[in-house]
Amino acid sequence: MIRRHVMPKTSPKSTAKPASPPKPAPPSGPAKPRAKAPPAAPVPAGPPLDALVLGGHPAAYLAATLLHVGDGKAKPLRVVHACIPGEHDPDRLVLVNPAVFGLHPLLEPVRKRLDLTPVYGVQFVSDDPAVRSEHRAKAAVVYAASTKALRAEFARMAEQAGVETTASPKRLEVQGVDEHGLHVTLNRQTLRPRALVLGGRLPDDQQKRLGVPDAWGPEVVFRYTFVRLTGKRWADLGPKPVAPMSLNLRETLCWGWLLPGPAYNQIAVAQPVETVGKLPPADLLAHWARVLHGAGNLPRADLPTPEAESLDLPLAGALAHEGVANRTLLVGPAGGFYCASGEDLYPNCWSAVFAAAALKKALKETHLQDALNPYRSQWRTTLGQYLRGPQQDLRFLLPLIYRNAVMTSRLAESILLGKSVVR
């Protein structure tokens, strides 16, 4: 069958040009890679933000909570909390001064939920197993708890109070500070907080943008090395345990601890970071294990030293650094609020209470930076004294500690509760 091909009708005055011939196909070859899509642009900033709190330490969660809940008189502040990517804080046992739960009514429910091991005192053990002394109270003096459990419960407190929290941000960058506030990128969101509360260490370039003081001097940094001891085969300190402690390992005035905990015990040593080269932490830890074994506190001395972990703590570092930077208050580990005896939770959280009070007041002022400066002095007369710990030269006190029961008790209470040795 023959099909007719009908041409379309055209106007006699049509000026249409004939179609151009098709272009030749490009020569065959490997396909060019596609250009990568540009990174997603940050989400524009949301409603005005009063404060951003950074850090995974309980002190940071407490600061965020206290800023957010207000005092019932003023309008609550808009506060955002975020942890810092890569923040190094391995799980370990720490001593808990019960006074920490009296810092704010919101902390009482935290105490009830925590699994706390009561500690009834301290047993001072020398390198000679025959020389020791003990302070034992009828009731628990302090408690021991894991930092993992403490972080979880303080984070829960902040969440229940309504704080907006980002626990595991993929991106966090403080890009700058100006007279209106800070420029911060949190994941894909751009934040413009008026002020910052910093509870952990940021990368060096961001620290410089904030004007945070340089790294801690070696005279305040102590290397804390510890091993978790799981199971009763390692240590059973009894139903009312006291914590064995050394004040002078290998005649170096380095300290050692054996702490009882809810799920495991922990052996630890603390030494000035300047001594690490001459006295490796693993050797000091092994020596402390032999001392404890000789004193009958450990059934065996062959520690699993490959499992040892270390971190550097600026003990009483707050006394050597400023706690104020560009529109920023330093709390907790960022501010060096560890007691000279190594205590962590109570003094660091106490700094958060001072910071929240100072920032609430400063946010009402026209010149916020100037209004932050009183924070420098507000904590020094009380918390500052607590941070100093035993101020006496322990080398001269050691003979008395092992012979005089009164001096034993006073030093134990100074280390555990921050009381003065001289009364």
Image (cartoon, rainbow, N blue to C red):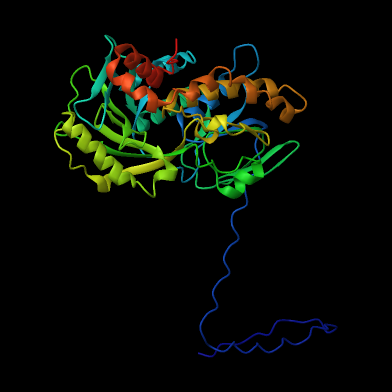
Quadrant of residue 68 within the rendered picture? top right
- Where is residue 207 drawn, in percent x and y? 60, 44
- Where is residue 86 drawn, in percent x and y? 46, 46
* Image vertical order of residue 164 relative to residue 304, above or below: above
* Image vertical order of residue 21 relative to residue 264, above or below: below
Q: Nearer the viewer, residue 52 or 263?
A: 263
Q: Does any portion of residue 110 appear in the rendered image?
A: no
Q: Is residue 414 left or right of residue 33?
A: left
Q: What's the residue at 85%, 83% (across, down)?
A: 13
Quadrant of residue 268 within the rendered picture? top left
Q: Is residue 359 left or right of residue 287?
A: right
Q: Nearer the viewer, residue 119 or 252?
A: 252
Quadrant of residue 47 within the rendered picture? top right
Q: Does any portion of residue 66 appear in the rendered image?
A: yes
- Where is residue 359 drawn, in percent x and y? 64, 24
Q: Say how many tags the image has.
A: 0
Q: Quadrant of the C terminus?
A: top left
Q: Is residue 175 left or right of residue 107?
A: right
- Where is residue 252 drawn, in percent x and y? 36, 37
Q: What's the residue at 19%, 18% (across, down)?
A: 239
Q: Nearer the viewer, residue 327 or 133?
A: 133
* Image vertical order of residue 51 relative to residue 119, above or below: below
Q: Is residue 355 left or right of residue 103?
A: right
* Image vertical order of residue 418 relative to residue 188, above or below: above
Q: What's the residue at 32%, 20% (across, down)?
A: 401
**Residue at the far right in the pictured view:** 13
